[in-house]
Image (cartoon, rainbow, N blue to C red):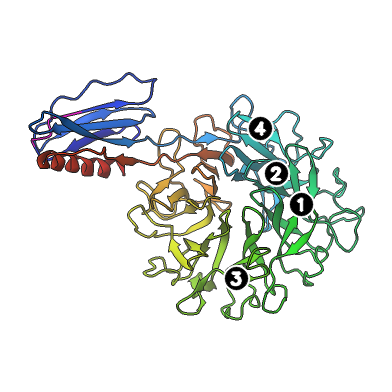
């Protein structure tokens, strides 16, 4: 819609006029369009800028002389909002000395990235190597920040109760529904200013901490149960935390052997959930058949609204007797409710009574990963290479996005276009809104939305109610981004996270606004504005109705592009 010319044609001479107006007060209203002759295509309007358009087409109402109209409301492309910005509105300047390890073992100049967003869409949290987002930020390390999109202010999260900043790297934050609680991974230095690691521990590993943004309290979740000195666990590492919606629990991945009595020896990564009020540590990656801990490695974790249900991916083969494939599967574990203690496989073909068949990628069998869960714990979104999650898979050897409904035991593909066409190209890193309505993901598929090219990494949103798919990663001029995806995240729109109203945060290497000149990763927020059509409840003579239906069909075809 942005700057486009809208044309409409209809095939009946009974439609006598067309006019339009806008709802934005900062643009001068255009004049009405003259009568439209039969069979012609007449330009109704051309607008440069963000504006809601309301188009009215009228026809004769019959012998009573009444006329009726219908209204089509369509919105222009949403402009991106930069979240990693300085107090003066400029994009952050990043500290080249701020470097930190990732689970893959790589070390990169971090920029700003890996965001999360509160359920109401108000708060965005992210990690950054910037030193100018908040005055007084120390250099030579990364930090966690929280951006308030309502007040346009940014707060430093990674400080303790005394206001002391972290001494190593911090990364991968997650935020509660109301923005109050923020968890993150902390890789402390040996002379840790927070006192997290034990004295003399010359090889400190990742620790999980939770910040209360109201009280300032900093809770240390990954303490050693063997040596109860308040210090961090020593025999392994921990990373990738997820907050429960109510802020009462934090889930994370850990290889620490001294974090829980049920943790297996060795370096396997398992799933744990820490209850913040009581300090209780709960083990999630266990089999309810045998009580054994998972014999494989977990790579992702998600937590529902009250911390009762955790989802994760693992290549363990002992969590279900049905799993004989040895590839990653998606599970949920219940801590409360009627299924308390149960570990359930999500990636399961109910009709065939077996897990989904592994897909092949680069000559190796691949399963499913990247789960995210709705607040009520009934919907799980995930990435899968399997060719039989749904029928008629068109992406052999590549990954797609699916949502499982745990109540109905059904799975549907969401890496699809608005007309139902399945994506051709890899899609990954999905996230589902807490209310279970919106799914966002990264994709290299070029057939989901118009204007994208194969292999470009873009952020996509799919409405699970209307089944409409929209592109999120536009620049401020409305241009589609088509750079190839990068090694860390996806160049145009990576690590998307969606709120209940569709507002989505993501990171990108591409400057989406003119002020972005730092040539680094930055965090942006985009809110899709979905086109809608509304027919007024009225009665038409047959000839007028035909004219209006034809006009509606034509307009929807144009506005939906």
The tag earlier along the polypeptide, 4 or 3, is: 4
Residue at point 41% right, 39% down?
Answer: 529
Residue tagged 3: 344
User: Which disc number belongs to residue 154?
Assistant: 4
| Residue 87: % across, % down | 64, 26
| Residue 221: % across, % down | 78, 53
The tag earlier along the polypeptide, 1 or 3, is: 1
| Residue 467: % across, % down | 39, 53
Above or below, 238 relative to 329:
above
The magenta stretch spans which residues?
Answer: 13-18
Q: Distance between the residues labelled 4 and 3?
A: 40 Å
The tag earlier along the polypeptide, 4 or 2, is: 4
Residue at point 48% right, 63% down?
Answer: 399
Say which element carries label 1.
Answer: loop
Above or below, 307 relative to 480:
below
The foreground one among 53 and 524 is 53
Above or below, 493 relative to 61:
below
Classified by dominant secondary structure, the portion drawn in magenta counts as loop
Does the CB distance between marks 4 and 1 fall below 8 Å?
Answer: no
Residue tagged 2: 181
Quadrant of the image containing the C terminus: top left
| Residue 84: % across, % down | 61, 35
Residue tagged 1: 276
User: Which disc number belongs to residue 26?
Assistant: none
Quadrant of the image containing the N terminus: top left
**Residue 226 inside the magenta-drawn segment:** no
Does the CB distance between marks 1 and 3 fall below 8 Å?
Answer: no
């Amino acid at each position: 819609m942005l700057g486009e010319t809208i044309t409409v044609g209809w095939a009946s001479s009974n439609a006598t006029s067309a006019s339009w107006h806008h709802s934005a007060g900062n643009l001068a209203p255009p004049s009405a369009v003259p009568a439209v002759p039969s069979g012609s295509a007449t330009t109704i309007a051309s607008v440069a800028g963000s504006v809601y358009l309301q188009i009215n087409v009228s026809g004769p109402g019959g012998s009573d002389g009444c006329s009726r109209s219908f209204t089509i409301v369509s919105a222009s492309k949403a402009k991106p909002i930069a979240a990693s910005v300085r107090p003066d509105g400029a994009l952050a300047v990043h500290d080249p000395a701020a470097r930190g390890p990732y689970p893959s073992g790589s070390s990169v100049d971090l920029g700003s990235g890996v965001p999360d967003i509160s359920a109401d869409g108000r708060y965005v949290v992210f990690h950054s190597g910037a030193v100018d987002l908040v005055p007084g930020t120390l250099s030579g390390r990364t930090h966690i920040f929280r951006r308030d999109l309502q007040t346009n202010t940014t707060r430093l999260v990674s400080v303790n109760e005394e206001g002391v900043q972290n001494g190593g790297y911090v990364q991968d934050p997650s935020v509660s529904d109301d923005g109050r609680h923020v968890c993150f991974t902390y890789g402390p230095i040996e002379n840790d200013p927070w006192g997290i690691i034990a004295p003399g521990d010359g090889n400190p590993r990742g620790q999980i901490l939770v910040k209360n943004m109201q009280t300032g309290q900093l809770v240390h979740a990954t303490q050693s149960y063997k040596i109860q000195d308040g210090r961090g666990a020593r025999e392994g590492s921990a990373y990738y935390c997820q907050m429960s919606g109510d802020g009462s629990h934090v889930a994370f991945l850990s290889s620490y052997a001294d974090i829980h009595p049920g943790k297996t020896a060795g370096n396997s990564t398992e799933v744990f959930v820490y209850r913040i009020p009581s300090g209780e540590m709960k083990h999630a990656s266990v089999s309810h058949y045998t009580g054994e801990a998972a014999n494989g490695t977990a790579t992702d974790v998600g937590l529902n609204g009250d911390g009762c249900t955790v989802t994760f991916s693992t290549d363990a083969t002992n969590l279900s007797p049905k799993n004989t494939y040895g590839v990653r599967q998606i599970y949920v574990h219940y801590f409360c409710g009627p299924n308390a203690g149960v570990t359930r496989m999500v990636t399961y073909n109910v009709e065939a009574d077996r897990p989904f068949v592994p897909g092949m990628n680069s000559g190796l069998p691949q399963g499913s990963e990247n789960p995210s869960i709705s607040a009520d714990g009934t919907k799980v979104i995930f990435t899968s290479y399997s060719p039989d999650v749904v029928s008629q898979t068109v992406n052999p050897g590549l990954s797609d996005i699916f949502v499982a409904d745990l109540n109905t035991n059904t799975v549907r593909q969401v890496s699809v276009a608005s007309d139902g066409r399945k994506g051709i190209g890899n899609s990954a890193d999905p996230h589902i809104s807490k209310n279970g309505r919106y799914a966002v993901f990264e994709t290299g598929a070029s057939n989901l939305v118009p204007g994208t090219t194969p292999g470009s990494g873009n952020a996509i949103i799919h409405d699970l109610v209307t089944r409409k798919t929209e592109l999120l990663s536009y620049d401020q001029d409305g241009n589609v981004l088509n750079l190839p995806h990068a090694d860390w995240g996806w160049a145009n729109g990576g690590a998307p996270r969606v709120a209940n109203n569709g507002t989505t945060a993501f990171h990108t290497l591409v400057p989406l606004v003119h002020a972005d000149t730092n040539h680094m990763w930055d965090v942006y927020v985009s809110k899709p504005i979905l086109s809608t059509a509304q027919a007024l409840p009225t009665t038409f003579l047959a000839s007028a109705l035909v004219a209006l239906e034809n006009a509606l069909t034509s307009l929807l075809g144009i506005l939906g592009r």
